[in-house]
Image (tube, rainbow, N blue to C red):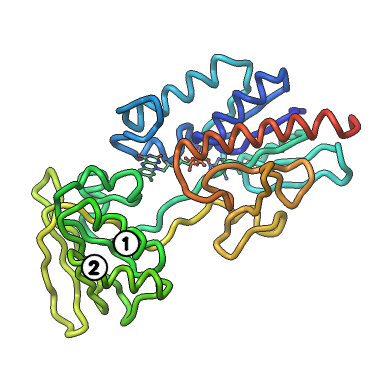
């Protein structure tokens, strides 16, 4: 059995694996896809101390760093069920979709999250070429340009306020007849001179010239199609944690995030969690990496305190 079994090979999982291995713990990492969301990212300019990199480069560097240690990497495998230990210090089980069951004294869940997509023509084709999901990450790439934000909940309105300070103009499109964001955010949004808010505006297509986004089409409340010329579309209709398989085992919040404390301990003793899958605020690479380190150090602290099985 492992001392520490990490589920997820994104920035949080990679960091947890390195910290655990450096404590001399028997460490394993199960990753459906090593690199996680980083693999879907183009330019990265906020990985502190690396002014510029890209997703595949950073993912390869994360994997090489993990491989420099004695970590068992089980990649291309999905975990489907967690069986918590019956007694403190006992072994947890993790069932994989392949049918295998792995055992470990501690488990670190780092399964990340994924952005909900609009599912309209052009969205996949122009991902990272004008279609973006993360204003903290990609906002500065659109300095002085025109963008749209799809989504009128808190994250959409926050994104529109954030982007309005950077870009030339923001069009916020909300499918329903009113914005769902908190009133303070709506008041702030309406005070901005370079924001247009469209309600009953259903984005139906993202258009481009083969290289970059050039506009979008939405169906208005009048039933007609309307076109907006722009250079970027930020999709803000939800970030979904990859935690469905944990619903019955651990405490999740209303958004499906794994509830963790300051030590990244979950509601199950000996099970820790890190990164985008958790309640840790702000979903970013540097934050996920810090979180993974915290979770691994907490797993170590747990192991030196509980009786051996
Ligand atoms: P993830 O990166 O989501 O990794 C999750 C891991 O878990 C993956 O290996 C996945 O395969 C695995 N997994 C999931 N479920 C299972 C399962 N059941 N069994 C086994 N394995 C499983 N952040 C920045 O800081 N700067 C940026 O510029 C930036 N740009 C971004 C651009 C895009 C397009 C996207 C989508 C995100 C961007 N982010 C950026 C956000 C950043 O990628 C995430 O915050 C970060 O990757 C979260 O790390 P994580 O390890 O928590 O999860």
The quarter in which the C terminus is drawn is top right
What residue is pinned by disc 1?
118
Residue 12: x %, y % from top left: 54, 36
Q: Is 48 or 291 nearer to us in this picture?
A: 48
Q: Is residue 50 left or right of residue 263?
A: left
Q: Is 119 or 60 nearer to us in this picture?
A: 60
Element under disc 1: loop
Q: How many marks?
A: 2
Name the residue located 30 percent from the left edge and 61 percent from the top edge: 161
Q: Is residue 169 left or right of residue 13?
A: left
Name the residue located 24 percent from the left edge and 68 percent from the top edge: 203
| Mark 2 and mark 1: Cα distance apart in space | 8 Å
Question: What mark, if any, has residue 203 been given in the picture?
Answer: 2
Residue 65: x %, y % from top left: 51, 19
Q: Residue 73 appears in which quarter of the rendering?
A: top right
Bin the neighbour count of mark 1 within 10 Å (Cα to Cα): few under 14, some 14-19, many 20 and up. some
Name the residue located 28 percent from the left edge and 56 percent from the top edge: 234
Name the residue located 66 percent from the left edge and 21 percent from the top edge: 21
The quarter in which the N terminus is drawn is top right
Q: Are marks 2 and 1 in contact (CB under 8 Å)?
A: yes
In the displayed structure, would residue 80 be above or below residue 296?
below
Answer yes or no: disc 1 within 8 Å of ligand 1.
no
In the displayed structure, would residue 305 be above or below residue 145?
above
Bin the neighbour count of mark 2 within 10 Å (Cα to Cα): few under 14, some 14-19, many 20 and up. many
Q: Residue 171 appears in which quarter of the rendering?
A: bottom left
Mark positioned earlier in the residue sequence (2 or 1): 1
Element under disc 2: strand
Question: What mark, if any, has residue 11 been given in the picture?
Answer: none
Residue 225: x %, y % from top left: 13, 75
Q: Residue 49 appears in which quarter of the rendering?
A: top left
Residue 296: x %, y % from top left: 67, 32
């Amino acid at each position: 059995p492992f001392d520490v079994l990490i589920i997820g090979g994104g920035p949080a999982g990679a960091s947890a694996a390195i910290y655990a291995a450096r404590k001399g713990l028997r460490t394993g990492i199960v990753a459906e896809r090593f690199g996680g969301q980083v693999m879907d990212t183009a330019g990265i300019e906020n990985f502190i101390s690396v002014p510029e990199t890209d997703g595949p480069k950073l993912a390869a560097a994360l994997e090489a760093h993990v491989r420099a240690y004695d970590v068992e990497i089980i990649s291309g495998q999905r975990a489907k069920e967690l069986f918590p230990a019956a007694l403190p210090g006992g072994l947890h089980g993790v069932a994989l979709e392949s049918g295998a069951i792995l055992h470990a004294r501690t488990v670190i869940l780092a399964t990340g999250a994924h952005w909900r997509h609009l599912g309209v023509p052009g969205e996949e084709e122009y991902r990272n070429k004008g279609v973006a999901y993360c204003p903290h990450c990609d906002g500065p790439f659109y300095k002085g340009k025109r963008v749209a934000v799809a989504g009128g909940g808190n994250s959409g309105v926050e994104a529109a306020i954030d982007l309005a300070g950077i870009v030339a103009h923001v069009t916020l499109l909300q499918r329903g007849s009113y914005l769902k964001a908190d009133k303070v955010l709506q008041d702030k949004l309406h005070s901005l001179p370079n924001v247009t808010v469209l309600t009953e505006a259903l984005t139906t297509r993202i258009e481009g010239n083969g290289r970059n986004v050039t506009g979008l089409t939405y169906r208005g409340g009048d039933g007609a199609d309307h076109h907006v010329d722009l250079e970027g579309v930020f999709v803000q209709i939800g970030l979904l944690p990859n935690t469905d398989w944990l619903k019955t085992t651990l405490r999740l919040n209303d958004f499906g995030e794994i509830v963790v404390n300051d030590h990244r301990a979950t509601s199950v003793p000996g099970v820790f969690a890190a990164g985008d899958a958790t309640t840790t605020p702000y979903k970013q690479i540097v934050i996920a990496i810090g979180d993974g380190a915290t979770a691994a150090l907490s797993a170590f602290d747990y192991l030196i305190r509980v009786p051996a099985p």
